[in-house]
Amino acid sequence: LKRLPPSGLLMAARVCKGWRETARKMWKAAEELRIRVPKRAQIGYVGSLLQKCPGLVTLTLKLER
């Protein structure tokens, strides 16, 4: 699960309670996050990811056109 992009990890968390708990732990442990933000995505998408990562040190955003 560590190799999944953030969107994949969000989808994996929907599989079952065990995967959701594992994904939650991974988000909390994340120190670096690289995200591609689709043009149609709203700021709420990025905000929801940031709430999941309290230990985040580095954030890289790539805005797609």
Image: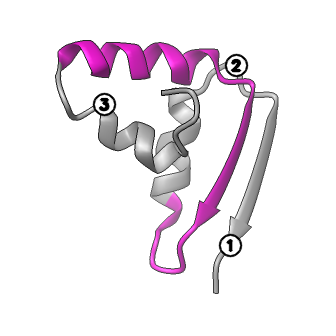
Q: Nearer the viewer, residue 39 or 16?
A: 16
Q: Nearer the viewer, residue 43 or 36?
A: 36
Mark whose residue sits in front, 1 or 3? 3
The outermost residue toward the left is 16
Residue 28 rendering spot, x and y as whole percentages: 56, 17
Residue at position x 46%, y 56% in the image: 44
Left or right of 55 in this view: 57: right
Residue 63 rendering spot, x and y as whole percentages: 68, 72
Residue 53 rendering spot, x and y as whole percentages: 59, 27
Look at label 3 and name its amino acid: Ala
Q: Earlier in the sequence, mark 1 or mark 3?
A: 3
Q: Secondary structure at mark 3?
A: loop
Residue 57, located in which quarter of the rendered image? top right
What are the residue bounds of the magenta stretch? 17-43
Query: Is residue 19 found inside the magenta-colored segment of the image?
Result: yes
Report the quarter where the C terminus lies: bottom right
Residue with the mark numbered 3: 13
Look at label 1 and name its amino acid: Leu
Q: Is residue 59 above or below residue 37?
A: above
Q: Are marks 3 and 2 in contact (CB under 8 Å)?
A: no
Residue with the mark numbered 1: 63
Q: Secondary structure at mark 1?
A: strand
Instruction: Tell me the tag on residue 38.
Output: none
Look at label 2 and name its amino acid: Gly
Q: Is residue 15 above or below residue 64?
A: above
Q: Is residue 54 above or below residue 64?
A: above
